[in-house]
Image (tube, rainbow, N blue to C red):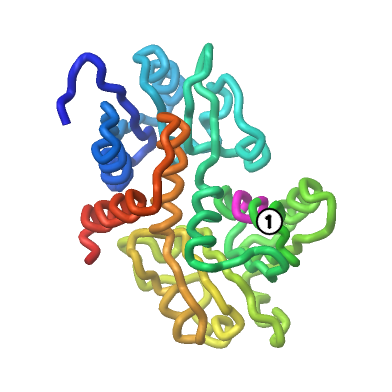
């Protein structure tokens, strides 16, 4: 595309950002739809987040994605948030408002869209979440919103999982979530099979052979496993789920759809399935995945 005085700029702020695959998604979408837009990463040093957000607005950036470690830290510098982002307590997409950026969370709608495409239903499911951090909080809120039958939070620190379970129960208005210490996973009902979602960074590149639970018996209780990690595209967690007889998915499609939803918010244009597949292919190519 030709960059000129009318070119809109979108980007990603985080630390680090050098590993991002988001430019492959957004620049493909813009190019294919003939939108005069470029997407670039911005490395924001620690302690300079407020300046980065205000500067991006002053420089008339059309939209901004936010990645770790700033998804919650950015909240005080926004004009407001949408209800889902407010409930989750984290944003990953900033959309221009009148006096500043408004924060949205497209991670969870992106995960839900990926699940729908994969034929995975949350309603009535026993959802097992590994971890109790920010990503686990978002997944638990999503599961509660979409009618999960029960949510079990497995975490190394029991008190953190218990606090999150109480928060989810308050938000849901019913007792849907419970906490368990990670080492107590063997107490999970043997007759149940779970939809398991791995939300920690255990198994992320370069430590690709790591996993929170190594016991193969645990994975025989999992009918479907999602690992929010996308690098590597196939994690040890996924391999163990499949070995136990379940279906396994990585965070690649979640990454794709959170980007597509952000792009739709910024441009007002809808991305059809064929273009989504093309952007997915470009993302995989950028990652060196065949």
Q: Is residue 155 above or below residue 102?
A: below
Q: Is residue 158 above or below residue 25?
A: below
Tag 1 residue: 146
Tell me the magenta residue range. Answer: 137-141
Q: Is residue 58 above or below residue 188?
A: above
Q: Which of 87 and 184 is in front in this view?
A: 87
Q: Nearer the viewer, residue 163 or 2?
A: 2
Q: Residue 214 location in percent, x, y?
A: 49, 80
- Quadrant hosting residue 190: bottom right
Residue drawn where x is 64% and y is 66% of the image: 154
Query: What kind of secondary structure does the magenta stretch mostly adopt?
Result: helix
- State left or right for residue 266 relative to residue 124: left
Crowding at label 1, few (<14), some or many (≥20) Cα neighbours within 10 Å?
some
Image quadrant occupied by the N terminus:
top left
Q: Residue 72 location in percent, x, y?
A: 55, 36
Q: Nearer the viewer, residue 222 or 214?
A: 222
Q: Evaluate whether residue 192 shows in this view.
A: yes
Q: Residue 102 location in percent, x, y?
A: 54, 25
Residue drawn where x is 58% and y is 60% of the image: 131
- State left or right for residue 153 relative to residue 26: right
Image quadrant occupied by the C terminus:
bottom left
Residue drawn where x is 54% and y is 30% of the image: 103
Decide whether residue 140 is among the magenta residues. yes
Q: Judging from the image, what secondary structure is the residue with disc 1 in?
A: loop
Decide whether residue 43 is among the magenta residues. no
């Amino acid at each position: 595309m030709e960059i000129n005085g009318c070119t809109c700029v979108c980007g990603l702020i985080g630390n680090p950002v050098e590993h991002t695959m988001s430019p492959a998604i957004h620049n493909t979408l813009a190019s294919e739809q003939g939108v005069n837009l470029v997407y670039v990463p911005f490395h924001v040093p620690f302690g300079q987040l407020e300046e980065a957000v205000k500067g991006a607005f002053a420089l008339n950036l059309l939209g901004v994605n936010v990645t770790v470690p700033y998804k919650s830290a950015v909240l005080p510098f926004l004009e407001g948030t949408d209800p889902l982002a407010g409930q989750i307590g984290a944003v990953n997409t900033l959309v221009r408002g009148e006096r500043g950026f408004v924060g949205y969370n497209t991670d969870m709608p992106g995960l839900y869209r990926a699940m729908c495409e994969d034929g995975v239903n949350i309603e009535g499911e026993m959802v097992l979440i590994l971890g109790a951090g920010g990503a686990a909080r978002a997944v638990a809120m999503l599961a509660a919103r979409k009618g999960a039958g029960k949510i079990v939070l497995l975490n190394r620190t029991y008190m953190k999982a218990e606090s999150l379970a109480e928060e989810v129960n308050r938000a849901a208005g019913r007792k849907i979530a419970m906490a368990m210490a990670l080492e107590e996973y063997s107490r999970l009902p043997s007759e149940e099979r779970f939809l398991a979602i791995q939300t920690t960074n255990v198994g992320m590149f370069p430590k690709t052979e790591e996993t929170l639970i190594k016991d193969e018996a645990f994975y025989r209780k999992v009918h479907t496993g999602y690992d929010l990690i996308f690098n590597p595209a196939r994690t040890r967690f996924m391999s163990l789920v499949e070995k136990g007889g379940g279906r396994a998915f990585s965070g690649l499609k979640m990454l794709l759809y959170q980007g597509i939803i952000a792009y739709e918010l910024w441009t007002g244009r809808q991305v059809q399935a064929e273009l989504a597949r093309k952007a997915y292919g470009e993302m995989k190519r950028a990652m060196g995945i065949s």
